[in-house]
Image (cartoon, helix red, strand yellow):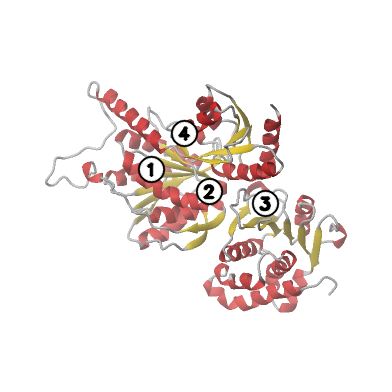
Amino acid sequence: MRMNGERKFIKGNEAVGYGAMAAGLRCYFGYPITPQNEIPEFLSSALPAAGGEFVQAESELAAANMLLGAVSTGVRAMTSSSSPGISLMQEAISYMAGSELPGVIVNMNRGGPGLGDIGPAQGDYFQSTRGGGHGDYRTLVLAPSTCQEAYDMMIASFDLAFKYRNPVLMLGDGIIGGMKEPVTMWQPERPADHAEAWQVDGAAGREKRLIRSLRLDEGELAQHNRHLAAKYEAMKAEARAECFLTDDAELVVVAFGSMGRIAKSGIRKLRSEGFKVGLVRPITLYPFPADVLETLAAQGKRFLTIEQNTGQMVEDVRLAIRRHADSEFFGMMPGELPGAEDLMAPMLDAVRRK
Amino acid sequence: MALYQDVIMAGFGGQGVMLIGNLLAYAGMDAGLNVTFIPVYGPEMRGGTANCTVVVSDDEIGSPIIQRPLGAIVLNQPSLEKFQPRIQDGGVQIVNASLVDAALVERGRIRSVCIPVNDIADRLGNPRMLNMVALGAFIKATGLLSLEQVEKSLSNVIASHYSYLIPKNAEALRAGYAFREGD
């Protein structure tokens, strides 16, 4: 599917599907769960029509392991799910991290813990940014706040997954997944994936290869994990954040994804009333854009972190600014649909409290 | 002032609020504006109402969720009770006079256009097009987009196998647009 610059009015979930197609997706494996079902719904017709493979697996475990198998052959492949389903995939994600495989995983976060509810939530921040499964690993995590970003980030996700040979997670939520916006369908220049160096695609005429995460030889795992750590360190170059009206801000609000864009509306209104409030919206959650925050903290600004959970990213904010400042916190609960007014009240409290 | 309008459209499931929400957003996009559409689900659906929120702006749109809207299209009484108090002072609401008790409609603080959309749609020969009548009245009351712009976008939201219904839907839009209270 080649994209021609057309502007389509689509849900965030559909934007994920279109973005993946633009990025050259070849295989999708998934199992249905709300609120991300439009992703497999779209890809179940679009992907086979483009010569790709769409599999509705018998479970999330199966889907994630099929993804592991597909990316071992060096093709661009993905899965998507929502919170409880993503939990079920963690074993395979850990194995992909250990095996250095470029799987792309989309999580449209819903309420938890457990089965929770089907409303929007940001309770999977910890799971997403701390690896999620067992072992000492990280995934790259991108967080869209608009349907266009969902499209753009799918393209970035595949590029980054192959660049670092590491799983990439896109963390959206029920708001982004279910809302509609115009999305411009652009066709990226695709960088070389360089999978020839490691893919298992038949060993005729070359040394055989083994993709694995089991490393039993003495010192082998230690060496491997040091290599992974160096890779995660290199990933820090990918840290991204949007800064909105931060230059002269007295109070910097930190919020990601849907909460970031809703906070922005509140900030615009407070600005019109003369309050100097700005926004930092982390675009990458791992690597976390700590430098941006530390620079602002060193200028003497105060901080308020807003999330749709009881306080997760705020720990990363506090770590980033610890030499200069602390951050207040305001949390919405899963399923609550905050408008700008809901987020303005805690901003006003914080900006007035000198 | 930059162009900005938000609207909550609410009614019983089946009255077609999602369709006119999509239509308004499509027309806004086709007019070169930024738009968001969000259907509200989950706890908000309890009480038998379906609703969606549309934002149209020539600037970047932050929140797609609006607690205190500038506009509302209210197709049944539970929706009036829920959303009328939330409308901002000076805002506008289109109220379905066929189903809503006129005595409960606020006047003065907000501008209310009471229009019997069920009766008008019945007269046009298709009671299901009440939603289009309401959207026509909203376009007239706000001047947000031209009627032609909205009519043009009908083909984007009505599936091709129902395309024979487009002229009738356009007629319903025009009937709502032409309505004057007291008629």
Label 2 CA crowd tier, 10 Å (few <14, some 14–19, many 20+): some
Q: Quadrant of residue A134?
A: top left
Q: Amino acid at mark 2?
A: Thr
Chain of the residue under the numbered disc 4 shown in the image: A
> Vertical placement of B154 versus A222: above or below?
below
Judged left or right of residue A39, residue A98 is: left
State the SS at label 3. Answer: helix
> Vertical placement of B32 versus A290: above or below?
below
Q: Amino acid at mark 4?
A: Phe
Judged left or right of residue A261, residue A167 is: left
Q: Amino acid at mark 3?
A: Met
Distance of label 1 from label 2 (alpha carbons): 17 Å
Distance of label 4 from label 1 (alpha carbons): 25 Å
Closer to viewer: mark 3 or mark 4:
4
> Vertical placement of B52 versus A207: above or below?
below
Sooner in the amino-acid sequence: mark 1 or mark 2: 2
Q: Which sits in the foreground, A93 or A235?
A: A235
Q: Which residue carries the number 3 mark? A: B45
Q: Quadrant of the N terminus of chain B?
A: bottom right
Q: Can residue A258 be seen from the camera position used here?
A: yes
Sooner in the amino-acid sequence: mark 4 or mark 1: 1
Judged left or right of residue B101, residue A64 is: left
Q: Quadrant of the C terminus of chain B?
A: bottom right
Q: Amino acid at mark 1?
A: Ala
Q: Which residue carries the number 1 mark? A: A64
Distance of label 3 from label 4 (alpha carbons): 37 Å
Distance of label 4 from label 2 (alpha carbons): 28 Å
Q: Determine if marks 1 and 3 fall on one subunit.
A: no
Q: Which residue carries the number 2 mark? A: A34
